[in-house]
Amino acid sequence: MNNFILTIKYRNEPLFYFGLVCFAASMLFLVASRLTRVQVMGVNAWYKPIKFAVSIGIYSWTMAWFTFYLGLPTQINWYNWVTVALLGFELLYIALQAARGQLSHFNQTTYIYSALYTLMGLAATCVTLYTGYIGILFCTQQFPELPGYYLWSIRLGIFLFVIFAMEGAVMGGRLTHTIGGPDEEKGLPFLNWSRKYGDLRIAHFIGMHALQVLPLFAFYILKNDTWVIVLGICYGMLALWLLVHALNGRPLVR
């Protein structure tokens, strides 16, 4: 484990430290969740910051691992600091709103909250598009040291991540993640995915984590170009089915 962590630090130090800060923040948010009964939309106010801190930390360490292969220090340095600045702003705003017992997402109650929510959405969109650009670099550069199946898993993982990260625009446009009912309904423990109505967050979550799932399966299990591509297609179809399922107002688990 120590060797893995040190390797991430060696590969991309800015994203390593940013991910480390996110994981540390998630622990602080977890403690805060045990010390308060304040709720937002029927769940503990600190659950959302915990989830976002862990998710951003995993994303940062994953991209720290991948960007090392590109060998483009100037371009990657720009990507690093844009990612740190924009996702850092997003996490900070979510945590501040949790501390105040206020919504961060879909909050249109004041002009300031509306503007900050819009800025948060723009920040997430910019990082997503920048990640897509990294995916294009993996398609245009040569990587003779990487097995073909592993390279395909990185490409597919990045592009599925981009597609289903952009699904956030669907939720943003609707100002809700629940289809067929209110967001206030309690759902699955911690995740809070709806057990009564369609929930767009499920496809969002599953699709974005193709970024980790596909490379892990490719490197440790499949080790075959064709099987990796088939897995990528099936994984994308699963995420798409979950999206359609939610748009029809049906829960994943009742």
Image (cartoon, grey):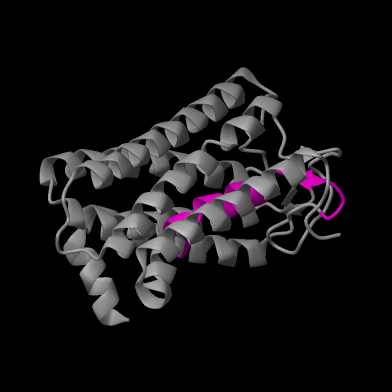
Query: Image point 48% across, 27% down: which residue?
Result: 119
Please provide percent x and percent y for residue 130. Answer: 33, 36
- Relative to 244, is 54 on the left or the right? left
Taking depth in this image into account, of 4 and 26 the one nearest to the observer is: 4
Taking depth in this image into account, of 127 and 132 the one nearest to the observer is: 132
Residue 217 in which image quadrant? bottom left
Query: Image point 52% across, 36% down: which residue?
Result: 166
Q: Where the N terminus falls, by quadrant?
A: bottom left
Please provide percent x and percent y for residue 73. Answer: 12, 46
Is-magenta flag for residue 207? Answer: yes
* Vertical comparison of 106 with 81: above or below: above
Please provide percent x and percent y for residue 70. Answer: 18, 51
Q: Where the C terminus falls, by quadrant?
A: bottom right
* Res. 16 visible in picture: no
Is-magenta flag for residue 158? Answer: no
Query: Image point 57% across, 65% down: which residue?
Result: 30
- Relative to 170, is 134 on the left or the right? left
- Relative to 89, is 151 on the left or the right? left
Q: Main secondary structure of the magenta part?
A: helix
Residue 235 in which image quadrant? bottom right
- Relative to 161, is 200 on the left or the right? right
Please provide percent x and percent y for residue 223. Answer: 36, 72
* Vertical comparison of 29 with 185: above or below: below
Query: Image point 31% across, 37% down: which residue?
Result: 133
* Vertical comparison of 73 with 47: above or below: above
Q: Which segment did they paint magenta?
A: 195-213
Which residue reaches farthest front?
226
